[in-house]
Amino acid sequence: MNTPTPTPSATVAAPEQTISPPRLEHFPIAFFSMVMGMGGLTLAWQKAHPVLGVPPIIGVGLRGAVSALFFVLLVFYGLKALRYPHAVLAEMRHPVKINFFPTVSISLLLLAIAYLESAPEAAFWLWVVGATLHLGLTLAIFGSWLHHTHYDIKHANPAWFIPVVGNIIVPVAGVRLVSPELSWFFFSIGLVFWIVLSTIVLYRLFFHEALPARLAPTLFILLAPPSVGFIAYTNLTGEIDAFARVLYYTALFLALLLASNAVRFLRLPFFLSSWAYSFPLAALTLATLIMATYLASTPFFTGLGVALLVLLSLVVGVLALRTLLAIGRREICMPE
């Protein structure tokens, strides 16, 4: 009996369909946290120019790199939305992944801040799009919390602060671009709901099971609200008053708390969520450099700012390298 010979197309197509899933379908929205980390590093180096006297070319180069990164990620996620809209909807309905959608609007706001001095008109439109998109996402996410059918206390984690932090970022550039009242509006939303969500998240961390390893790096997001709040508040008021000090020293205490658990974080394997280390650390670095500006007679803040800037640059560099290695090993954009 003669056995039919399989055609070349059949021998090639079958393994590809069973072994190689479409990676674009699994391109995660969390990739935009890379832009937040790189954007934070950019702003820190831009601030280091007037405060520490570093060459401005570093900030300019980083700004170009993060702009290109945002464009590339936007193209890839746009292609995913066109080809696999069901995958995007699945992320939007996921109790954890939904909180990473505001990383897109936050990226636009950070780019607006980065271009504020050199290209104010471009910064204005980046800010308008970013602020509008972020308000819409905040309403959608808060609405999903209010009218949920699938949330549980175990879903609460520091990533829930991402929508809140974005509202606090809006005034950083907004106070120079539009009416101060609009900036106070966003600042008020972020500040009040930071306190509300802090209670929920800390209750979950204190009295329920520990975060899974994949989400453990998001503990660094605890740093972001008080750090960014300090930056926005000083931009709104133009001074360091008692409330500004409360915000900054709260962030500094949380940094000490996280630093005391550094060994635990170093033992964690690399996940895309590891980028959660970067932006909060960048926010604290920038806040410290601002403290050094206002309190020039206290050299402690200058020294701490330098140390944090070095640490931040090292962390972002390692994260970027680990991300490239993970992409090369096909450890990212795969089904969970």
Image (cartoon, grey):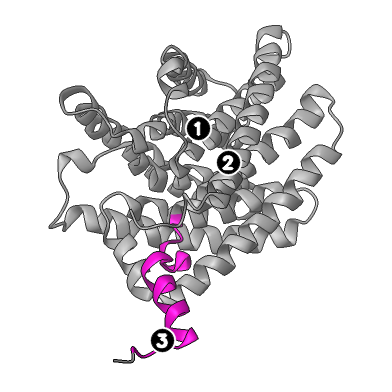
Real-space Cα distance between discs 3 and 2? Answer: 51 Å
Tell me which corner region of the image, top left, top right, bottom left or bottom right, holds residue 102. Answer: bottom left
Residue 10 place in picture, x, y as percent: 42, 84
Q: How crowded is mark 3: few (under 14 residues within 10 Å), some or many (20 or more)?
A: few
Residue 301 place in picture, x, y as percent: 65, 13
Instruction: Kindly state the secondary structure of the residue where label 1 is placed.
Output: helix
Q: Are marks 1 and 2 in contact (CB under 8 Å)?
A: yes
- At a point 81% along the width and 38% down the height, the residue shown is 58
- Mark 1 and mark 3 lie on one chain; the one further toward the N terminus is 3
Residue matched to label 2: 37
Q: Residues within 10 Å of mark 2 (few under 14, many from 20)?
A: many
- At a point 76% along the width and 52% down the height, the residue shown is 64
Query: From this viewpoint, which residue is outermost toward the front?
Result: 1
Is 10 part of what is drawn in magenta?
yes
Instruction: Kindly state the secondary structure of the residue where label 2 is placed.
Output: helix
Q: Which mark is residue 6?
A: 3
Query: What is the quadrant of the N terminus in the image?
Result: bottom left
